[in-house]
Image: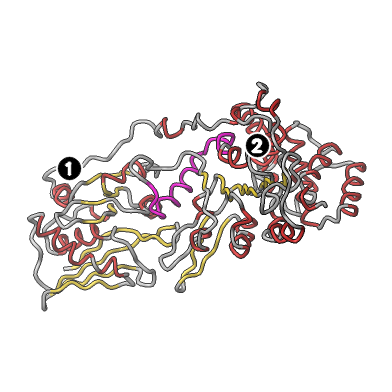
Amino acid sequence: MLSKIFSASVLGIEARPVIVEIDISQGLPGLNIVGLADTTVKEARERIKAAIINSDLGFPRGKITINLAPANIKKKGSHFDLAMAIGILSASNKIETLGMDTYGFIGELSLDGSINIVKGLLPMVIALRDRGINNIIIPRGNKEEAVLAQGINLILADNLKQVVDHFNRAKLLTPYIKEGKFNRQALSRDENLDFKDVKGQEVAKRVISIAVAGNHGLLMTGSPGTGKTMMAERIPSVMPEMNYDEIIETTIIYSVAGQLTKENPYITKRPFRKPHHRITPAGLIGGGSDPKPGEISLANKGVLFLDEVGEFGAGLIDMLRVPLEKKEISLFRKGDNFIYPADFLLVAATNPCKCGYYGDPTHKCKCKDYEIDKYKARLSGPILDRIDLHMTLQPITYDGLESIDSMSSSDMRKQIEKTIKIQEERYARLPIKYNSQLDNGNIEEACLMGRDEKKLLQNAFNKLNLNPRTLFKTVKIARTIADMEESETVGCQHIAEALQYRSSLEYDKR
């Protein structure tokens, strides 16, 4: 007898519906799985047999063939276990099939028949929902993650016997209904990380506000102790709360990467990722023999912080050039194309030289000129060009530490949210949200300037030896500064301030 059961398979961060076809015929007893199944799927033979037997359901005799269709899509993972087990029981008349074509099945089986949690569940639930599958049976441990997919009946099961009893009408399983939309505590901000604790760096806070408001990448240069890391860690505290679409997209990435936990079943806070400088290329941009999202994707809709960016390999940093422009990374592995989102705010920090004190008025630099040049060369020109804002931090004075006039994260966030709203209204009819996303085709319309402003840009272009990319980035930054001051046009004062953040790094001038 033949049976067909719905499940799904993940490819990259997307999932596709899969039909699990089971045929039981006469012949030597055995179980064969076909349809481009990987080792994990084929190992399910022993798990499924033991789970059915230990659930007192009786394993059928005969030749069992399981086909995962469509056969041209690679299948991997242990989440097909439940669908294959239900298909075998259906094909052997051990379970009623009425209405089963409206169900999807996702779950890994233990030898005793219990259903274990799986990674990548959210995109699979969404794929089945979009296929028109109204009911999906999932492991109970995945309920908080799956509930993000609205408009579907989620049915939680602890073991295989419960699923069989549900279809045989012995004991029905009721759809899971979550009270409230999200865990309020998960949405709350980390009160321990607030910019009010950063003393004596009010100018730096201004630059950070510009970076977040316009989604401009930021490079902070300064000697040790100037607060580079301290401020970077607090940037998520001034970013707007994530909306539903951002939560879904980011949670899918973490689900596929297997980084969701019982305590954090979905992502509602802006990610802050701080990879070590010895990270591998696959760890940073994604990939590997079993492709997974890298740090640039795990930082999606949040912050990617590269501390001591000069310590990262030059080739590694250059890999960020395409993601910074495209906001995604495309990887080819074993004939498949994996596309991962990489819409992150890049924040990098570096010392001005190897000893860390070049240009510091309070300490003497011990480096030779050639050592400073070698240290600077670790960041290539193309990468520096793609980082919008360059800021040099000055050492903090004692009076600065004693100052009580320190802008808090709440104060900064209010101004940032107001600026973002202005941009959203301006670009309502365009496929962009931030000034940093403007291209050559729409930058002139969005950045209205007079004759004096254009003359200032021309003089800056010639005297500062700017290239076209740097010039356009200066205009975008000026547009963000103007938005922060609620100015419809870009003025000379906005351009002048923007030029401070786009000219050569201060420690280049000797």
Residue in front for this viewpoint, 436 or 28 = 436
Residue lying at the far bottom of the rendered structure: 27
User: In the image, residue 192 lies at what x, y percent?
Assistant: 50, 30
Image: magenta residue range: 235-260
Q: Which mark is residue 245?
A: none
Confirm whether the magenta stretch covers residue 178.
no
- Can you tell which quarter of the image residue 488 is in? top right
- Secondary structure under tag 2 reads helix
Which residue has dot 1 on it? 172
Q: Is residue 321 above or below residue 272?
A: below
Outermost residue, top side = 404
Q: Earlier in the sequence, mark 1 or mark 2?
A: 1
Residue found at x 25% / y 69%? 42
The residue lying toward the viewer, choosing from 474 and 170, is 474
Mark 2 is on which residue type?
Answer: Ile
Depth check, mark 1 against mark 2: the one in front is 2
Residue 508 drawn at (x, y percent)? 78, 53
140 sits left or right of 167 in the view: right
Position of residue 426 measured from the top left corner of the image (x, y, whole percent): 70, 39
**Front residue of 255 and 190:** 190
Q: In the shown orientation, is residue 240 left or right of residue 250?
A: right
**Residue indicated by mark 2:** 420
Q: Residue at x 39, y 44 (%)?
A: 149
Front-most of residues 445 and 185:
185
- Count of residue discs: 2
Give the structural element (helix, strand or loop) at label 1.
loop
Query: Quick check: 196 above or below 328?
Result: above
| Amino acid at circle 1 | Leu
